[in-house]
Image (cartoon, rainbow, N blue to C red):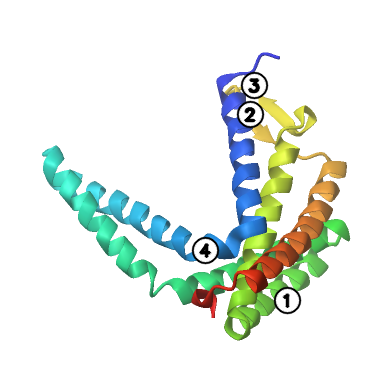
Amino acid sequence: MNLSANETVLILSALVFILVGIGLCFAGWRFFKLALILAGGIIGFLIGSALASEGTDNSALILVAGVVGILVGVILAYPLFDLATIFYGISGGVALAAALAQALNAGQTLSIILLALGIILGIVLAFLLRKYIIMLGTAFNGAAAMALGVAMLIPGNRVLVSQSAAVRVLLQPTWQTVVAVAAIVLGLIGFVTQWNDYVRNGNSSLD
């Protein structure tokens, strides 16, 4: 099968979705803080080096600014832990609401109601049950990433846009339902797996 460069990138992206999704879905609680720290460092480096490059062409100074950005990003990652937990609560609630709306073939009004309920539920759970919401958020987000990644690998779900030779994902109706149901089922399995792992190898950093 001959693939265009854009389609190759899309397929590689799908594989990344699947691999990252597996890690998040079944072991998200284990590296949640590490992921935040790494993200903070990467974002800090990008911001620091970008700001420095605006004022100088000296690569050494740009590198130093990037390193400083890494330190700042890592330091700020810790206070953002609670905010990130809320984000996971909201994103998990939204993902669940979207999956339910798709599975139920809900209309616009019902979809908006489910979305609002998902956001409210996510925020409440983020405050009351932090370690659970981390597991739920990573499980369902990872499950959604896995399901979408697999769907992206199905040729019938990839459409070539002839004007630009770009390839975009256009899930067929049947696959939309499959992805929605798979995300819910895998999310539940992922949460149970994470919870059992947590009970056996408890990590007080989530408490």
Q: Nearer the viewer, mark 2 or mark 4?
A: 4
Q: How many marks?
A: 4
- Please state which amino acid type lies under the numbered disc 4: Phe
Asked if residue 21 lies left or right of residue 151, the reply is: left
Q: Nearer the viewer, mark 3 or mark 2?
A: 2
Mark 2 sits on what residue? Answer: 167
Give the image quarter of residue 207: bottom right
Q: Position of residue 191 (x, y in %)?
A: 71, 65
- Please state which amino acid type lies under the numbered disc 1: Leu
For this rendering, which residue is in front, 69 or 32?
32
Asked if residue 143 lies left or right of residue 127, the reply is: right
Q: Secondary structure at mark 1?
A: helix
Q: Nearer the viewer, mark 4 or mark 1?
A: 4
Mark 1 sits on what residue? Answer: 117
Which of the marked residues, 3 or 1, is nearer the chain's N terminus?
Answer: 1
Q: Position of residue 172 (x, y in %)?
A: 82, 39
Mark 4 sits on what residue? Answer: 32
Mark 3 sits on what residue? Answer: 162
Q: CA distance from mark 1 to mark 2?
A: 34 Å
- Please state which amino acid type lies under the numbered disc 2: Val
**In the rendering, which numbered label is found on residue 74?**
none
